[in-house]
Amino acid sequence: TSKLRSFEELEGISTLGFRGEALASISFVAHLTVTTMLHDKGATHALRATYLDGKLVDPPAVPCAGVPGTTILVEDLFFNMLTRKRALKSAADEYSRVLDVVGKYAVFKTGVGF
C-alpha cells in the first residue's frame, strides 16, 4: 500500500498483498516449496523450488505439473526451533485459527479461492 497515490487505487488492488520478503524468514524455520507457472498461454509446465535452512536446494528449479499462478507450501513450521514449536497449541487449535484468518480474507475478496 505504500505505492498507492489515491483512494481509487486502493479499490483496484487485485491481490492479497503477500510480502515476498517473508519467504526468506519462513525458509529458515520451515520446509518451503514454491511452485509457479506463468499465465502465458504458451506455458507448458510449472517450476518448483525447494528451500531448507534458508538455502535453495539443488537443483534450483525443477519442471513439474502446475496451474497458472504461484503456490507456496510451508511444511513442518518451526521444525528446527523447539521452543517456538512448543508454544503452538494442538493441531486442531492452530487449524481453527488459520480457518478464522482465511475466512476473514475470503469474505472481503470475492472470486479468490483458498
Image (cartoon, rainbow, N blue to C red):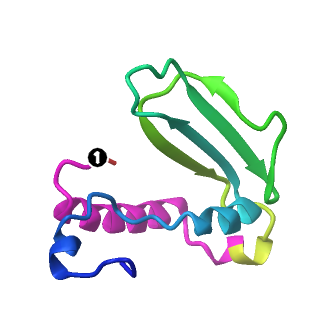
Mark 1: which amino acid? Gly
Q: How many marks?
A: 1
Indicate left or right for 9 with 88 as reference: left
- 20 up-or-down from 47: above or below: below
- What secondary structure prevails in the magenta region? helix
- Could you say which quadrant of the image residue 46 lies in? top right
- 64 up-or-down from 5: above or below: above
Is 93 part of what is drawn in magenta?
A: yes
Residue drawn at (67%, 54%) of the image: 76
Question: What kind of element bears circle 1?
Answer: loop
- Could you say which quadrant of the image residue 103 lies in? bottom left
Residue drawn at (50%, 17%) of the image: 44
Indicate left or right for 74 with 94 as reference: right
* Residue 89, percent from left and from top: 56, 72
Q: Nearer the viewer, residue 76 or 27?
A: 27
Is 32 part of what is drawn in magenta?
A: no
Residue drawn at (54%, 22%) of the image: 45
* Residue 32, percent from left and from top: 67, 50
Indicate left or right for 4 with 82 as reference: left
- Could you say which quadrant of the image residue 30 lies in? bottom right
What residue range appears in magenta?
85-113
* Residue 15, percent from left and from top: 32, 59
Classify mark 1: residues with Cα within 10 Å, few (<14), some (14-19) or many (20+).
few
Q: Give the residue pinned by disc 1.
A: 113
Residue drawn at (76%, 64%) of the image: 28
Q: Nearer the viewer, residue 111 or 78?
A: 111
Query: Dividing the image into 4 quarters, which one contains the N terminus?
Result: bottom left
Q: Nearer the viewer, residue 87 or 74?
A: 74
Q: Nearer the viewer, residue 108 or 97?
A: 108
